[in-house]
């Protein structure tokens, strides 16, 4: 059981940092057009897109949807681990 939780948490951390790096790349000119930027975009944008659709940018420029997406991802991880623990014991 501990191994499954460990794998889930590791996958969460990897994806969390991928989202953070992708967000920070938006501050650098042409960073998202690089190989790494395009690769991260293919992995991160499908998850961020639904949040961006429902959460408009604040003041027209400040996009808080990635923050909400990361909170939802954390809640999903906690819920999944709780379900696993419930069925394991």
Image: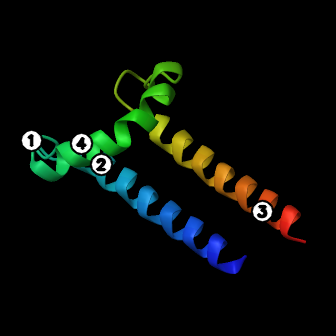
| Label drawn at residue 30 | 1
Q: Which class describes the residues within 10 Å of circle 4: few (<14), some (14-19), or many (20+)?
A: few
**Mark 3 or 2 closer to N-term?**
2
Depth check: give the residue in front, 29 or 3.
Answer: 3
Q: Secondary structure at mark 2?
A: helix
In space, the residues marked 3 and 4 are separated at their CA atoms by 36 Å
Q: Which class describes the residues within 10 Å of circle 2: few (<14), some (14-19), or many (20+)?
A: many
Verify CB contact (< 8 Å) between mark 4 and mark 2: yes
Q: Secondary structure at mark 1?
A: loop
Depth check: give the residue in front, 24 or 46.
Answer: 46
Residue 10 as seen in the image, left or right of residue 57: right
| On screen, residue 73 above or below 86 | above
**Which x, y percent locates residue 37?**
19, 47
Residue that carries the numbered disc 4 in the rendered image: 26
Residue that carries the numbered disc 2 in the rendered image: 22
**Mark 1 or 3 closer to N-term?**
1
| On screen, residue 7 above or below 19 | below
In space, the residues marked 1 and 4 are separated at their CA atoms by 8 Å
Residue that carries the numbered disc 3 in the rendered image: 84
């Amino acid at each position: 059981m501990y191994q499954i939780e460990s794998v889930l948490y590791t996958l969460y951390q990897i994806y969390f940092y991928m989202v953070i790096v992708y967000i920070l790349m938006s501050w650098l000119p042409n960073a998202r057009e690089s190989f790494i930027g395009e690769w991260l975009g293919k992995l991160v944008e499908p998850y961020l897109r639904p949040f961006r659709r429902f959460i408009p940018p604040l003041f027209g420029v400040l996009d808080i949807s990635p923050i909400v997406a990361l909170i939802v991802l954390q809640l999903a991880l906690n819920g999944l681990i709780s379900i696993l623990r419930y069925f394991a014991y």
